[in-house]
Amino acid sequence: MHKFIAMVGTNSTESTNRKLLQYMQSHFADQAEIELMEIKDLPMFNKPEDRQVPELAQQMADKIDAADGVIISTPEYDHSAPAVLMNALEWLSFHIHPFLDKPVMIIGASYGALGTSRAQEHLRQILDSPELRARIMPSSEFLLGHSLQAFDDEGNLTDEQKVAKLDGLFADFQTFVEITKKLKHANVANYQEVRDLDWDKL
Amino acid sequence: MKLVGIAGSVEDHSYNRTLLKFIANHFSDQVDVELLDIQDVPMFNQSDDQTEGEAVQYLKRKIEGADGVIIATPEHNHTITAALKSVIEWLSFKIHPLSGKPVMIVGASYYDQGSSRAQLNLRQILESPGVDAVVMPGNEFLLGDVKQAFDEHNNLKDDRTVSFLSETLGKFLKFVKVINTMNAKPADEGWKSEDLQASGSVPTTIKGLNMHADDWVDQATAKTNAVSGNTYVRLDCGVLTVDQLNYFLNSMPMELTFVDANNQFLYYNHQTDAKNMSASRKPSQVGNPIGDCHPKRAIPHVKQAVHILRTGKTDLFKLPVPSNGEKCDMHYYQAMHDAKGDFQGINEFVLDILPIVKYYLGLTGQKLVKDPNAKTDAVSGASAKEQTDDVSGASTDTETVPTVDDVSGASADTEAAPEEQPKVDDVSGASSNS
């Protein structure tokens, strides 16, 4: 059974993105082990000259390292991913590289109709950057619009079409994780490159 | 024109901040650029609203007071920094100071990309409805290989880069004018909310007294146990007794009036009787809301004047009060601020500048002659003040020094034809009538 880290892309106390991940955790409990990861306690990234990442970031990195993949659920603020999520990814690419070649599934929930379409696009771009280099599942989008109305009292998604779509995408992600294991020919080179990447030496 | 610059970085050492400082220094003859600090802005969290906190309010106030904004962005992971994004999120959550604001994006990066992706991303973010900024299209200024870009004085080394930056900034200054003209409301109605009856309060307001009372000063003294006489008072750079303060203020070669941020008249330097003053005041008026000190017809103008000082449209404006040529009384209205930059009231000072002019002429052996090309008359200061238009209001502000036109306009009165006789402005007229 695959083990996934489910990153909650917000620091908000009330979040339908957290709800969505909690739903997946229980809904897919027989298919995968999903552990939620909060990002709200990381300090503001300030590129410390001593290159020390906070203890918490290191712990998060270790968990991601040990997982088969990461699911990130992002809200959308100002047509993009929230600062707090960008912040977590800055720490998680600062002389540590837990996302390198890591399979990632992006989902998102929003109060409005668009369901974080632009934030997801933004997040893809970020995860594709040289110091993250995640393996993002391509051509798959799970947009949960009107998210305040999407769950019942037990936290289940009520829209059957949405459930079917999520089931399909999650099954794809399981397969994608396996495929990604085979996409390993550049792993060594990637690791080498990221290790050598040192902006300070440019 | 006044711009504010935001460097999208909270690192101790930031090349983007260096770039903004270079812009501020190098082009200081063309535009006033003030750098804003985002160091103290907390991470955005919608469950922990800190919009009213000092760090966010500081940015709000500075951005609202500026004609435009320059943002210098680094690039982290193909996008802007979380620190900058967090600032933008605060400025698009409960408040929207960037709405309609002209913005120019620049960026510096270690690598040869020069923040290209971060800049595109920033454009997209700034144009989202909650932010609603007006980003200048095109004119991308990308500073790659930034570690080699500056000399030891933090000046850009490459002349072509400077020249491109100059061209870009020149376009932005025009862009700012165009956008602010386009967005200018027919009339900024904000001034109407100025409460000249001082019915609100500020933290220093002495409450529970009748502001209109003739003996307000005595009542206020009793209420606050205000010190007087030879009690020492610690000032910024000195220690004086209250008596010494009075000697000092009363010997100022001008009439001084203190109006607090609540529009209450709290003090004037009592040098002489009302009838001998340029802007007459009586001891019994002290404590009055300033609405009491002006005739009704002048109220809108007083409101406008107070409002542009309160909102930082200008920190000083001046009104010449032309008379018969024997005098040139100038009324100066100077906004007062505390260390944080918050508006604390108005220092009105009135003096006759003609003796100064005459002294200077005598000293240098010159005389005043009429300028055949003069376009402005002596009341131009007053009429400029009344314009509520953002752009011209702002540009007037930069002229803080009385121009020769004002002076010659005034002295020309002795021989001037009636139609050239400058009209007494409502505001200054009001204070001399009160």
Image: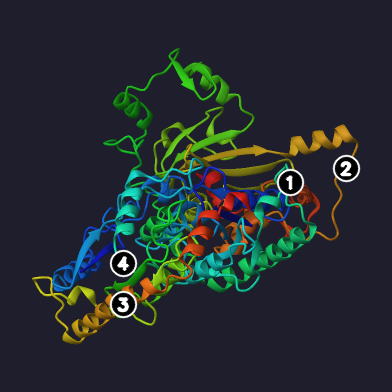
Disc 1, disc 3: CB below 8 Å? no
Q: Are marks 1 and 4 on the same chain?
A: no
| Residue behind mark 2 | B367
Give, as a three-letter code, the residue at label 1: Asp
Q: Secondary structure at mark 2?
A: loop
Q: CA distance from mark 1 to mark 2?
A: 49 Å
Q: Are marks 1 and 3 on the same chain?
A: no
Instruction: Report x, y in % for residue A180.
Output: 37, 73
| Residue behind mark 3 | A115
| Left or right for B305, reference B414 | left
Nearer the N terminus, badge 1 or badge 2? 1
Q: Are marks 2 and 3 on the same chain?
A: no
Disc 1, disc 4: CB below 8 Å? no
Q: Are marks 4 and 2 on the same chain?
A: no
Q: Residue B169's quadrant in the figure?
A: bottom right
Nearer the N terminus, badge 4 or badge 3? 4
Disc 4, disc 2: CB below 8 Å? no
Q: Secondary structure at mark 1?
A: loop
| Foreground disc of the pair 1, 2 | 1
| Foreground disc of the pair 2, 3 | 3
Residue B81 appears in the picture as rendered: yes
Q: Secondary structure at mark 4?
A: strand
Give, as a three-letter code, the residue at label 3: Gly
Mark 4 Cα shell of 10 Å, populated few (<14), some (14-19), many (≥20): many
Q: CA distance from mark 4 to mark 3?
A: 23 Å
Give, as a three-letter code, the residue at label 2: Lys
Q: Relative to the observer, which residue lies in front, B90 or B271? A: B90
| Foreground disc of the pair 4, 2 | 4
Q: Secondary structure at mark 3?
A: loop
